C-alpha cells in the first residue's frame, strides 16, 4: 500500500426531498436547523454513513452500528479486547495505536479514543479525515404531520393508549453542502494511504446507498456532485477555507423557492494551479 502523498480537500452537494436527513433528539426528532433557519446534518451523522458505505465495500470498521454488526461483538471494548495485537500492546501506546490503525479503516481515517475500564487503556488516535457539519444553501421548510398506529404497544383497558399518536417531520426540499479535508501529517501517523483516499471518494459518491428508512425513503436523498481537490504538495497550496470558498451558490433568476438541484447556479472561481475533479453521485 502506498503512502498518502498530498493534501486533499473535498466538497459534496446533496439534496433532500420530503425526508428527515438528521433528526434532533433534543427537539422531538425534528430535522436539525440553526437559528437562521438553515438545515444542518451533523458531522457524526455523515461519518456514520461513510462508515456504513465502507463496510459495504468490504472494509473492516471499528465503530459498527448494532444493525450492521458483522463480528458479533456488542461493544467497542469487547471488539478491542478480542483483537490479540491490541491486547499484546496494552503497555505501549504507539504500538496499540498502530495495531488499531492497521486493523480498522475508520480508525486510521477518522481516529478513535480507546478508553476502556477493563484493561485501563487510554489511547487517542487523531485521524486525517475531517468532516464539517453539512449546512443547507437556503433556509429549509419543515413540515410536521401527526401519525397514528393501528395497534397499542402495550395492553390497555381504556381503548387506544397515548403511544398510538405521534409526530413525523420532514424537509420539503433542501440542498446541503458537506465540506472536508484529508491532512497529510496525520495520514502519515495513522498509515492512511492514497488508496484509502480513493475509497473515501467512492464512499462519498454513494453516501446514501443502503441508507433508506422511514424517515429517509429510497431516492429522497441524493449525492448530486462531488468536488475533489488534490494539492501538489503535502501541506497544500492553499488553506482548506480558501479552497472551499471557491464554490458558491446562487438561486436562478425567476425561482422564488428552490425545489431542485437545477434551481441553483453553481459558481466556481478556481485558484491558480488547483482545479477540482468533478464527479456525479452514484
Image (cartoon, grey):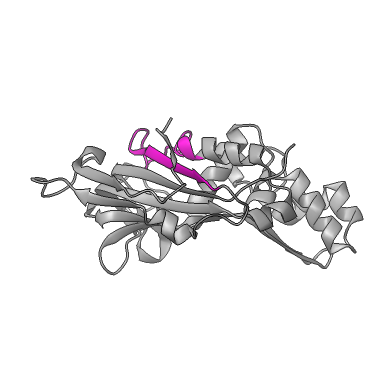
What residue do we see at 88% from left, 54% from top? 87
Horizontal relation, residue 103 to residue 245: left or right: right
Where is 203 relative to 32, above or below?
above
Whether the magenta-drawn stretch holds residue 212 is answered as yes
Horizontal relation, residue 6 to residue 175: left or right: right
Of residues 187 and 32, the one nearer the viewer is: 187
Q: Which residues are magenta?
A: 204-231
Horizontal relation, residue 2 to residue 6: left or right: right
Horizontal and vertical percent position of residue 221 = 36, 39
Where is 120 relative to 176, above or below?
below
What residue do we see at 57% from left, 47% from top? 232
Q: Quadrant of the C terminus?
A: top left
Of residues 81 and 242, the one nearer the viewer is: 242
Q: Residue furthest left?
A: 254
Camera sees residue 150: yes
Horizontal and vertical percent position of residue 49 = 51, 44
Of residues 234 and 253, the one nearer the viewer is: 234
Amino acid at each position: 500500500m502506498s503512502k498518502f502523498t498530498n493534501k486533499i480537500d473535498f466538497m459534496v452537494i446533496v439534496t433532500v426531498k420530503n425526508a428527515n436527513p438528521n433528526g434532533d433528539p433534543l427537539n422531538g426528532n425534528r430535522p436539525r436547523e440553526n437559528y437562521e433557519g438553515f438545515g444542518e446534518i451533523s458531522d457524526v451523522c455523515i461519518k456514520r454513513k461513510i462508515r456504513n458505505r465502507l463496510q459495504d465495500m468490504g472494509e473492516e470498521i471499528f465503530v459498527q452500528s448494532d444493525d450492521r454488526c458483522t463480528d458479533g461483538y456488542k461493544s467497542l471494548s469487547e471488539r478491542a479486547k478480542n483483537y490479540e495485537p491490541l491486547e499484546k500492546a496494552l503497555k505501549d501506546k504507539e504500538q496499540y495505536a498502530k495495531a488499531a490503525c492497521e486493523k480498522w479503516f475508520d480508525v486510521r481515517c477518522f481516529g478513535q479514543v480507546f478508553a476502556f475500564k477493563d484493561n485501563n487503556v487510554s489511547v487517542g488516535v487523531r485521524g486525517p479525515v475531517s468532516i464539517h457539519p453539512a449546512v443547507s444553501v437556503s433556509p429549509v421548510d419543515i413540515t410536521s404531520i401527526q401519525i397514528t398506529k393501528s395497534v397499542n404497544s402495550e395492553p390497555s383497558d381504556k381503548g387506544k393508549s397515548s403511544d398510538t399518536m405521534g409526530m413525523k417531520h420532514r424537509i420539503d426540499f433542501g440542498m446541503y453542502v458537506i465540506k472536508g479535508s484529508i491532512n497529510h501529517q496525520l495520514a502519515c501517523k495513522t498509515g492512511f494511504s492514497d488508496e484509502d483516499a480513493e475509497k473515501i471518494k467512492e464512499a462519498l459518491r454513494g453516501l446514501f446507498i443502503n441508507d433508506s428508512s422511514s424517515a429517509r425513503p429510497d431516492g429522497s436523498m441524493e449525492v448530486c456532485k462531488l468536488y475533489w481537490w488534490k494539492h501538489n504538495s503535502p501541506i497544500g497550496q492553499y488553506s482548506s477555507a480558501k479552497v472551499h470558498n471557491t464554490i458558491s451558490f446562487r438561486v436562478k433568476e425567476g425561482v422564488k423557492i428552490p425545489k431542485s438541484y437545477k434551481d441553483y447556479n453553481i459558481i466556481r472561481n478556481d485558484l491558480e494551479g488547483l482545479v477540482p475533479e468533478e464527479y456525479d453521485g452514484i
